[in-house]
Image (tube, coloured by chain):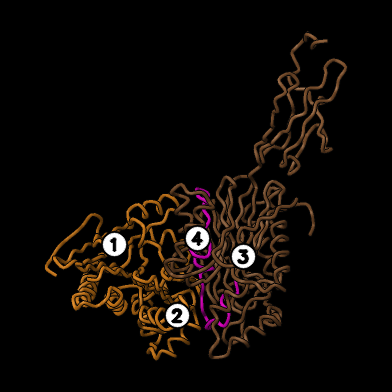
Amino acid sequence: MKPVIVVHGGAWAVPDELSKASVDGVKAAARAGFAVLEKGASALDAVEAAVRALEDNPVFDAGHGAVQNTAGEVELDAIIMDGSTLASGAVSSVRNIANPITLARAVMEQTEHAMLTDRGANLFAEKMGLPTVTTEDLVTETERREWERQKSYAVGVKELFNKQWVHDTVGAVALDSHGNVACATSTGGIRHKMVGRVGDSPIIGQGVTEAVKKALKYMGERVQGGGGAIAVCPSGQWAANFTTKRMAWACVDGEALHYGLNPKEEFQEAP
Amino acid sequence: MGPQPLKRAPPLVRRRALSFENGGSPDVHTGSFLLSPIVVSWRRTSHHPPPAPRVFHPPSSCMSAVLCFKCQSVLCQVPVKVMLPVIVIHGGAGHIPKERAQLSCAGVREAARGGYGILRASGSAMDAVVEAVTMLENNPAYNAGRGSVLNVKGEVEMDAIVMDGRTLDSGAVSAVRRVANPVQLARLVMEKTKHLCLTAEGASQFARAMGIPEVPEESLITDYARMRWKKNLAPDANPVECQMGKMGTVGAVAVDTEGNVACATSTGGMINKMEGRVGDTPCIGCGGYADNKVGAVSPTGHGEAIMKVTLSRLILFHMEQGRSAEEASDLGLAYMKERVQGLGGVVTVDPKGAWAARFSSLQMAWAAVQDEQLHYGLYAGEHFTESAQEQS
């Protein structure tokens, strides 16, 4: 089986000054994930590696670079799922963790549960010996300024996604050489969200199993929601689509690195 | 003397001309009365000699029957069954100790009647499911609200969700503490915030902002919950098995007279769970889903398994593909059992009022009200009916 990995850096109106950094970021993450697959490791390992790379990159709203809630704190959500067993782990509203995706994987592998939230998630991280980082470390200077500017949260969520400046979720899906699929998603959520707000990231099955385009169209028609998704199926077919202005995405399928930012855009280079 | 020639429009059907030997009223016969064969004989009149008695086998849906005087054939009046409104309730899937079975069954019947009362008064499906689940939260026999199981620290952390099939609006709370009715808080998240789910301390902050009184932890804890918590602190205890050894989560689905569907689910979660553990209940598509175009589902069972297969959305997916509420529920539960060895149960409705209460666990206390009839059961294959007006 030919391994494949697809990553995205969030569906939103990526501003021009961030577009190069976004595309470079997803390309690097796709390569990092594919390197894991090439070594014969599992899809699960690959999506974790790719999402960790995105979390560590301050360009994206996940881990370093996450947005702040109304109280000025960073609360992170993440999910990981193993297609071979349907095992899944998630954390919601966890604080001061640089790589929530790794914590989500620990929930999957080290507990009998599928999701831990808030303080319980942090207690578990402590027990697992995961290092903590300060909120100041996670928040970029740009984010701090934006947060101040939008303090009132006067703008609706719809506008955030459909029009302008919301950073968004990062994610990865992969197929390994054994035919197993896995997905991982991580986010800081939306700026000025309420304390304790949990979004879609820690919820299983959304966006990956459905045919991407149809699902996005349905979401747009039914609840006027803009968004993006990446998908891979056990046959090796993959997709990256979005209904927002832009979404940085990249895919390595062994033959080439495919990537894009604007609608209907697809570039290729050597992997 | 032969039949008299008729002068005006012939009265094809003469109701008074028949009688039932088993003593029923000759006019209109309703309910189960007609379910057994009846010997029908003609009454002697001054004009006609009585034809020979005959046995009439009415179909089960027959509400009243009349005999044609001339041809002696039986005309069944099969009225269109009133499908809306309908409400279906569950009180958790699993295995329930005998001494608690009575309580569990009584509670779901009461909640079904309560929710139906709202629907009959033209209330919305959302009002009805929230009312029914609130009643179950207040009832200490269930693992939701008062009576919730305790986490490993001996605290109560609750999850709840509501969803409105008209708009796909949804609200949820996870790991919330010290509120009497998490389902009502979930509804406030839906109606008063721009978000779908609030968790732990954030959910409590929101409750305070909404003026919901904080209740003492003790008021939510029953002796039974504390006993089971202690029992499961032993290092060799198996909380998942123990969980299946009790009734869990509560939930409701309903369709109102306008054809709107809604669902609500509430739970104390899994016994001796880790602090901060979130199960399927507050996750949209897992612990509930409602869509006017398809139907509504509220599940119960092993939360981690329900999440893995996104059970509620999976069942609605099968219904979108043309399966009935019952077939889709069975397919979803069978997949969960086969793929992740998870047991559970669901209540499901479609917008036309067809409903199902299905489970793969040993028991699930369920009750439904439709067309003034209360349906209920506990074991697989059990299905009792009584008038919705009777009080048990």
User: In this image, A102 relative to B118: left or right?
Assistant: left
Q: Amino acid at mark 3?
A: Met
What is the distance, in whole Å, between disc 2 and disc 4 at their CAs? 26 Å
Q: Is residue B207 left or right of residue A34?
A: right
Amino acid type at mark 4? Ser
Is residue A28 at least partly visible in the picture? no
Colour in which chain A is shown? orange
For label 3, the SS is: strand
Earlier sequence position, callout 2 versus callout 1 = 2
Which chain's residue wears label 1?
A: A
Of tags 4 and 3, which is closer to the observer? Answer: 3
Whether the residues at callouts 3 and 2 have beta carbons within 8 Å, the answer is no
Rounded to the nearest angstrom, the CA distance separating label 3 from label 1 is 36 Å
Amino acid beneath label 1: Cys
Q: Which residue is mark 2?
A: A94
Separation of marks 2 and 1 at Cα, in angstroms = 30 Å
Mark 2 falls on what kind of element?
Answer: strand
Is residue B267 shown above or below B124?
A: below
Residue B309 in view (yes/no): yes
Q: Which residue in the structure is indicated by mark 3?
A: B364
Q: In the picture, residue B8 is in which quadrant?
A: top right
